[in-house]
Image: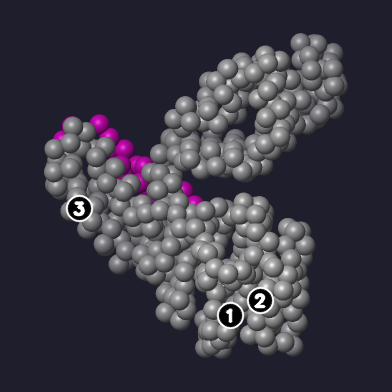
Amino acid sequence: MFSDLSGRFRDTLKKLRGQGRLTEANIQDTLSDVRIALLEADVALSVVREFIDNIKVRALGQEVTKSLTPGQALIDIVYQELTKLMGSENHNLDLATTPPAVILMAGLQGSGKTTTTAKLGKRLRQYEHKSVLVVSCDIYRPAAILQLEVLAKQNDLQWFPSEANQNPVTIAKSAIEFAKRQFIDVVLVDTAGRLHIDDVMMTEIKAIHGAIKPIETLFIVDSMTGQDAVNTAKVFNDALPLTGVILTKTDGDARGGAALSIRAITQKPIKFMGTGEKTDALSPFYPDRVASQLLDMGDVLSLIDDVKHKIDETQAKKMANKLIKGKRFTFEDFLIQLEQMQNMGGIDALLKKLPGMGAVPDNLKSKMDDKLFVGKKAIIQSMTPQERKFPELIKASRKQRIAKGSGVHVSKINQLLKEFEQMQKMMKKMGKGGGMMSMLKKMGGKMPTGFPSL
């Protein structure tokens, strides 16, 4: 998300860095560029106008003109205003009610509502340790009911059956009664959508809402639809007492206009964003972190969260103890590290959270591909157990055999051996310094020395 807008912002704001003096003229030029960038990103005109006015008032004030680094001060104002525009802080789900806490999922057909229902259920089960029941009220699309049933089973969620000949209100109420009897913590109610807003859909969802009185009413919207997403959000917000928004398909949205507009138009917080197709690809929406990424300042906090939630704790402790005791780092350990990094979303997701990555040339970015992991894993898996433990055994004939087994040139074996040597040195330092979490906090968003080359 935001790759186009981030590029425009980076090009515009880098002109200001290091400038000893800012005038009304060059501030005006900068804001004009920012305005164009926002409009091209499909941000609502009214939102752009207010955003620019807010920055202008502050930029022409004493906090910039009397700053020792006025260019940096203006960039900081842009960051603060972006954060405020998107809601200032993360808003958690409100589950403070007598169980079950009922969450109504609303949105148009094709927005990713059913998949998001499963993603949210999985997240509540994994991180909030809640028992979750999901139910579909989409009687117009039997395939949607089946889809949610399949997703529920795949993600260890409880499933309440429904059929096309039933009444949506009856389905929802029956599911909640069942949840009460079974002492289930949360009920997620997936509603019917349409390809566009119509009276029948809005009447039905208002009837469901009135009957079940959910503690959370979430609007699910496809961020890739841009200005249409904002218009749809406004209609739903006028019809229902929305408590929050979930942006879907943000991994495919290069513009980001919806994220910057919906909060301002609806005055409802964006609570989560979908970042991929997998059911664990749902992340809390932190306005300050998104603004930081947008301005190419990185997002080390989210990277640390990924480490906490997506790295196998048992494996991590085992690795830490091994390093602390001074034991050697082997290719078996390296293989585990590669798999852990894949669990965190791969090299692309990792690097996006590091500062300055927007300035990396496109030809280098194109090489930052998860195929790198596949190739390295294939090489390691072509080694014998003995070679993985003692890589110094890998000489000419062994390299030829490994290359043949993994389908690569011998030069790739040499490259990996060199990378592994660098990785060994880095892991030795980590063993003395408290592990990956400590390293991330200390490195200030910069790649550690010795990180495997791409």
Report the side of 326 relative to 449 (left or right). right
Residue 208, image quadrant: bottom right
Of label 2 and label 1, which has the lower sequence position? 2
Of the numbered discs in the image, which one, if any, rests on residue 272?
none
Query: To which residue does mark 1 refer?
Result: 212
- Front residue of 314/137: it is 314
Q: Amino acid at mark 3?
A: Lys
Q: Nearer the viewer, mark 3 or mark 2?
A: 2
Q: Amino acid at mark 1?
A: Ile
Residue 47 x, y percent position in the rendering: 32, 64
Of label 3 and label 1, which has the lower sequence position? 3
Of the numbered discs in the image, which one, if any, rests on residue 176?
2
Q: Residues within 10 Å of mark 2 (few under 14, many from 20)?
A: many
**CA distance for labels 2 and 1:** 8 Å
Report the side of 235 relative to 367 (left or right). left
Q: Residue at x 24, y 52 (%)?
A: 55
> Looking at the image, how many numbered discs can be counted on the residues?
3
- Please give the range of residues in magenta: 1-21
Labels 2 and 1 touching (C-beta < 8 A): yes
Q: Residue at x 86, y 21 (%)?
A: 384
Of the numbered discs in the image, which one, if any, rests on residue 56?
3
**CA distance for labels 3 and 1:** 46 Å
What is the secondary structure assignment of the residue under circle 1? helix
